[in-house]
């Protein structure tokens, strides 16, 4: 997921998790043992999920809970990027 543009919808963790049937759980970082909580909704490519806030070990150790989006969900975000690109000269690449 590192090479894809990521968007962070402004929506509650609970609503996003319910919408994509994601079971929210916390886990320790594989490097330092700090308990990570996936609370930040994200969409990238065909993935929808929750990611933990960054911590000192770097993004390789972030906790990510994700699921594949349906084709109609993917089209929704492709259309959003298209509108942003046209209205604001925004290019997520």
Image: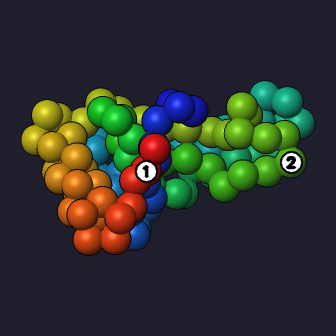
Q: Distance between the residues labelled 2 and 1?
A: 26 Å
Q: First in sequence: mark 2 or mark 1?
A: 2
Location of residue 85 in the rendering, given as x and y in whole percent from the top left corner: 30, 60
From this view, report whether residue 62 is shown above or below residue 41.
Answer: above
Q: Element under label 1?
A: loop
From this view, report whether residue 44 is shown above or below residue 40.
Answer: above
- Give the residue at the far left of this rendering: 72
Q: Is residue 10 left or right of residue 73?
A: right
Q: Is residue 57 left or right of residue 8?
A: right
Location of residue 29 in the rendering, given as x and y in whole percent from the top left corner: 77, 36
Judging depth in this view, the residue of 46 and 52 nearest the camera is 46
The disc at residue 92 is: 1
What residue sits right under mark 2 in the picture? 56
Q: 10 Å neighbourhood of mark 1: few (<14), some, or many (≥20)?
A: few
Residue at 46% over, 44% down: 93
Residue 87 visible at all? yes
Q: In this view, does 85 lie to the left or right of 33?
A: left
Residue 11 visible at all? no
Q: 10 Å neighbourhood of mark 2: few (<14), some, or many (≥20)?
A: few
Judging depth in this view, the residue of 86 and 56 nearest the camera is 86
Q: What's the coloring here?
A: rainbow
Location of residue 34 in the rendering, given as x and y in whole percent from the top left corner: 82, 45
Q: Element under label 2?
A: loop
Q: Is residue 6 left or right of residue 73?
A: right
């Amino acid at each position: 997921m590192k090479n894809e543009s990521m968007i962070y919808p402004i929506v509650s963790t609970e609503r996003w998790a319910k919408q994509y049937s994601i079971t929210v759980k916390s886990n320790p970082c594989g490097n330092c043992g700090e308990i990570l909580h996936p609370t930040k909704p994200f969409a990238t490519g065909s993935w929808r999920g929750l990611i933990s806030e960054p911590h000192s070990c770097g993004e390789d150790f972030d906790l990510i809970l994700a699921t594949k989006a349906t084709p109609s969900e993917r089209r929704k975000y492709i259309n959003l990027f298209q509108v942003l690109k046209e209205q604001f000269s925004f290019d997520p690449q």
